Image: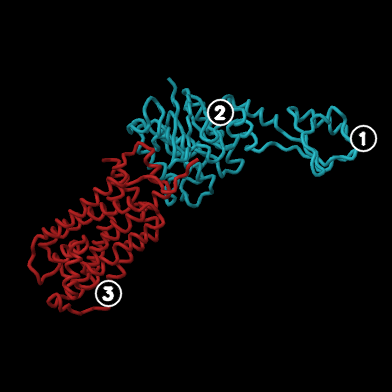
Amino acid sequence: MRLLWWEFVHHTRVFWRVPVAAFFTVAFPLMFLVLFNLLNGGARIEALGGLAFAQFFTPAIAVFSIVTACYTNLVITTSMDREDGILKRVLGTPLPPAAHLGGRVLAASGIGLSSVAVMLVVGVLAFDVRVLWGRLATAALVLVIGAACWSALALAVAGLTSNGQAAPAIANATILPLAFISGVFFPVESGPEWLAVLAGVFPLRPFVAAFSEQWNPLVEAGFPLAELATLIAWGGLGALVAIRRFTWEPSTKIRS
Amino acid sequence: MGVIEVADLRKSYDGVVAVAGIDLSVEAGEVFALLGPNGAGKTTTVEILEGYRRPDSGVVRVLGADPRRAPATWRDRIGIVLQQSGIEKELTVREAITRLARVYSRPADVAATIDRVGLTEKADARIKTLSGGQRRRVDMAAAIIGRPELIFLDEPTTGFDPAARREAWRLVAELAADGATVILTTHYLDEAHQLADRVAVIAGGRIVAEGDPSTLGGREQRLARIRFRTPRVSLPPDLRKLVSIELNGWTEMIDEAAVSTLHALTGWALEHDVALDGLEVIRPSLEDVYLELAGETP
């Protein structure tokens, strides 16, 4: 437990020391939040029954920063660290492998959750986003389950990615198309129904929907059981693949 | 029973044999060097001992345990320098070593360890700003922070300048004096000579020679060649018989006692006013020594 804490501190520190990672994970979604809200200031979304744009977009892009931290960032840093022999080095010490990976996941989750908090605060202060206080606990639960699910998927993908150089491309190629059909940038309700159904099969749409619902005053508050079940199923699948396929050594083994 | 006991160790990668039947026995407190060219099987052997690789066959016992099944308490007793550093370059030296100190049950003092590898002035510098030799010293500090009984050093001084190399040698000697067992791989003959109590020369996945490093050094001396432009005056008979090759206007001599031969040769040249153009003494390349040793395989 003590080691898990120190690994969390370690990975959080390393994260903030790499400006590029910090930029893409934290500053990029924040930039989207500000720009889109400025460009669409005052607009209402008809497909969502006249919901204010900021009230739709702020939670959607905020929750997406959990994905950039726990998925995109975790796939890339874990694969690259494996390529650099960092995982192998750790395996040669008494540090339990679970504490090392747990530290990575907790650090990514911490970064993602802080990023969500910052974006929501900016949304409330600058773009008149309304907080539905009664639904905040459910919203927080969705975030925690989402962080766990995306982290598990990240470790699975890192396990399937044998080449560290390819990791950024693989992470982005798997998540960006999903982001466009899952209601992060545009409401799915404005597109064809089959696309929304398709998006619902993957974990991003249920995650965004479950969270956004907690911020939409025009719909009844309900517990997003189906969405969370989908997320947990994907997370479980990710964990299974990660356990079976995760490797600690660089793909290009030095054999001499 | 020794710290390391290996019997008939074998390992292939996709049908390519890396280790072809190695026996080793290392006693506590010994500094043991595996010397060999690239691709000889040094790293594969050491990584099996460290628990990273599973051998195809053979018996491996390190600190009394099978490295593949050894628990964390076993890793608490060993220190490793891998060929690839594996330490986050964004951290400062102190941060990296402090983090590793936390995972060992009885770590050494962080500041003292950093001082021991000569990085006190760089303790708060990011590792990425350090030179290659300095980074390798961070790896050394990381390997010894847990006060290991057994230390693996896989080519620890590759990329070092001569001063840094001597510094690293001093450190290894110090660790050995403290009673640690050290397993070292290197392709530098002088490094093995300098550090090791015992050397095994490894080539093609086999140990081709093993023993006291000074005897290997002797072989190196013995092989020295003397080379010069063939003079117009013919050599006296006692020197003549040492000539090994005469080709394209060059004469080459090989002798076990290069110094006295050189003395006789230059003495003769002065006496007869012969200019020995292009005179040089060629020490054998490591490959020459390996080849000679490999040729002596029983």
**Badge 2 amino acid:** Val
Amino acid on which disc 1 is placed: His
Image point (52%, 28%), residue name: B32
Chain B, hue in figure: cyan
The residue tagged 1 is: B272
Quadrant into which the N terminus of chain A falls: top left
- Residue A43 in the image: x percent, y percent? 20, 80
In the image, which disc is placed on residue A79? none
> Disc 2 marks which residue?
B199
Question: Can residue A202 be seen in the rendering of this structure?
Answer: yes
Query: Tag 2, which secondary structure?
Result: strand
Query: Residues at marks 2 and 1, common chain?
Result: yes
Q: CA distance from mark 3 to mark 2?
A: 68 Å
Above or below, comparing residue A79 to residue B37 in the picture: below
In the picture, measured across the screen, residue B182 lies left or right of residue A216, that is: right
Q: Amino acid at mark 3?
A: Phe
Image colour assigned to chain A: red
Q: Is residue B164 above or below residue A153?
A: above
Label disc, if present, on residue A36 of the rendered structure:
3
Reply above or below: B245 against A17: above
Q: Chain of mark 3?
A: A
